[in-house]
Image: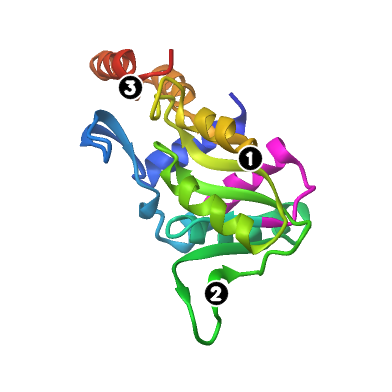
């Protein structure tokens, strides 16, 4: 596993964003782990988060894109801090764009925040984590309605490595449905291997994780 991925796992733990215990997800699944990107709350944390996203995007998609798009609401700060980090790390100005939940009809009108989308723009979408793909169902029509753009891909913090609506993972379902690449800074399988090696995950927790993936994991 690349060094920046290990640093990102440590960063999630230090920020209390990734936790182990007993959690009930929106899907109703009982999970032994949970990631809450809303707990990145300080300037230092947000700066580091943007750097990790920028590195992952650069390593995965390269520099040939124009806009980083963050779906409301958690994607908004991610898109902003990623655009800042990208300029600082790679010297390229990337515009940020996000959507509103409701269309604004006065002042700064429309559905978008930040940069307008223009015909020919190449866009990378950023989110915290995708479990069902529902946010993409809401987001993609909004983006496509604004301009004739190309979505280069999606980057999330964590691939939970579990089934979505069917037998495939949520990221694979999105890729199959919309035709663009889907990637994560790190996968849960990479995290488990790394934290077992570090001694953070003990035998009892490892057994619970194995049981969870036996039931909900990708086949």
Q: Nearer the viewer, residue 206 or 67?
A: 67
Query: Looking at the image, can residue 82 be seen?
Result: no
Cα separation between marks 2 and 3: 47 Å
Residue position for label 2: 110
Q: Is residue 95 something that shows in the picture?
A: yes
Q: Residues within 10 Å of mark 1 (few under 14, many from 20)?
A: many
- State the residue at coordinates (43%, 18%): 218
Locate the C terminus and report the quarter of the image it occupies: top left
Q: Position of residue 47 (x, y in %)?
A: 55, 57
Look at mark 1 in the image and give the residue it sits on.
56
Which residue is painted at 38% across and 19% down in the image?
217
Q: Which residue is mark 3?
A: 201
Which mark is nearer the camera, 1 or 2?
A: 2
Position of 39 with respect to 130 (left or right) is left
The one nearer the camera, 122 or 48, is: 122
Residue 196 point in image, percent of width and height: 39, 18
For the record, the magenta segment spans 49-67
Residue 34 place in picture, x, y as percent: 31, 37
Quarter of the image where the N terminus is located: top right
């Amino acid at each position: 596993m690349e060094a920046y991925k290990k640093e990102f796992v440590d960063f999630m733990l230090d920020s209390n964003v990734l936790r182990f215990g007993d959690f009930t997800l929106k899907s109703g699944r009982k999970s032994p782990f949970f990631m809450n990107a809303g707990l990145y709350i300080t300037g230092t944390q947000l700066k580091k988060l943007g750097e990790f996203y920028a590195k992952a995007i650069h390593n995965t998609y390269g520099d040939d894109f124009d806009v980083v798009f963050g779906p409301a609401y958690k994607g908004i700060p991610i898109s902003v801090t990623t655009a800042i980090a990208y300029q600082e790390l790679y010297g390229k100005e990337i515009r940020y764009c996000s959507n509103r939940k409701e269309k604004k009809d006065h002042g700064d009108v429309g559905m978008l925040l930040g940069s307008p989308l223009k015909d020919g723009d190449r866009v990378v979408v950023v989110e915290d984590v995708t479990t069902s793909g529902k946010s993409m169902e809401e987001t993609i029509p909004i983006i496509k309605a604004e301009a004739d753009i190309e979505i280069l891909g999606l980057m999330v913090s964590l691939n939970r490595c579990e089934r979505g609506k069917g037998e495939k993972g949520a990221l694979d379902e999105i890729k199959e449905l919309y035709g663009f690449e889907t990637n994560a800074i790190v996968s849960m399988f990479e995290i488990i291997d790394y934290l077992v090696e570090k001694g953070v995950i003990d035998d009892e927790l490892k057994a619970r994780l194995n049981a969870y993936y036996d039931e909900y994991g990708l086949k």
